[in-house]
Every structure is written in C-alpha cells, then in structure tokens.
Image: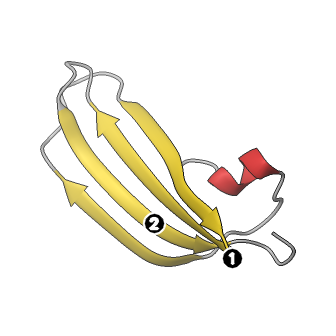
Amino acid sequence: MLPPLGFSIGQKGWAPTVQLQVLVRGVPAPGWCLAETRAVQIAGGWIDEDCTIWDSEGKLVAQARQLARLARGH
C-alpha cells in the first residue's frame, strides 16, 4: 500500500484504479522490501504508475503497473 503518485502534483483525495497488472517474480527473502514507484505519464486526467519491489537480498520479487484517474482539474 503506497500513497497515490498524484500527491506529488498536489492532487488530494481518491485516485481510482482503472487497470492494475501485478507480476509476482518470487517469494521475498526474510526482512524488509524496497519499493520504487514512478509516474510514467500524467496527462488528460490519467496517471500511469509503475512499481518495482526488491527483497532484502536485492532480488526482484514483484512488478506492478496501474492506470488511474486523477481528480477533475488535473
């Protein structure tokens, strides 16, 4: 669970998911995971987000892509 990337451009509130794809690459090693989330495109009321997750040993364990709507006015 991560905050919506729309927060970085000042959007407040709900960013409903329209499409979500998750690729589970493996079982994470014990310990913390590191997640990187990026907004690939922010345009026309839409935001494309990519997320990559590595385990405590540096192994890629998951990837996700989400298409979400932005609040009106963005």
Horizontal side, residue 33 vs residue 4: left or right: left
Q: CA distance from mark 1 to mark 2?
A: 16 Å
Q: Position of residue 46 (x, y in %)?
A: 63, 73
Q: Which residue is mark 1?
A: 44
* Picture quadrant of residue 58: top left
Residue at 55% in and 60% down: 41
Q: Which residue is mark 2?
A: 66
Query: Which one is in front, 26 or 52?
Result: 52
Q: Amino acid at mark 2?
A: Gln
Q: Position of residue 35 (x, y in %)?
A: 42, 35
Q: Residues within 10 Å of mark 2 (few under 14, many from 20)?
A: some
* Picture quadrant of residue 54: top left
Question: Which of the two discs, 1 and 2, labels the residue nearer the N terminus?
Answer: 1
Q: Position of residue 11 (x, y in %)?
A: 81, 58
Query: In the image, which is nearer the foreground, mark 1 or mark 2?
Result: 1
**Number of the label disc, if any, that sits on residue 60:** none
Give the quadrant of the C terminus: bottom right
SS of the residue under disc 2: strand
- Give the colour scheme of this rendering: secondary structure
Horizontal side, residue 66 vs residue 14: left or right: left
SS of the residue under disc 1: loop
Q: Residues within 10 Å of mark 1 (few under 14, many from 20)?
A: few
In the rendered structure, are the residues bearing label 1 and label 2 in contact, judged by CB atoms less than 8 Å apart?
no
Residue at 29% in and 51% down: 63
Rendered position, 68 above or below 56: below
**In the image as oriented, which residue stretches furthest toward the left?**
26
Q: Amino acid at mark 1?
A: Gly
Residue at 35% in and 57% down: 64
Query: Which one is in front, 65 or 32?
Result: 65
Rendered position, 68 above or below 54: below
Horizontal side, residue 40 vs residue 25: left or right: right
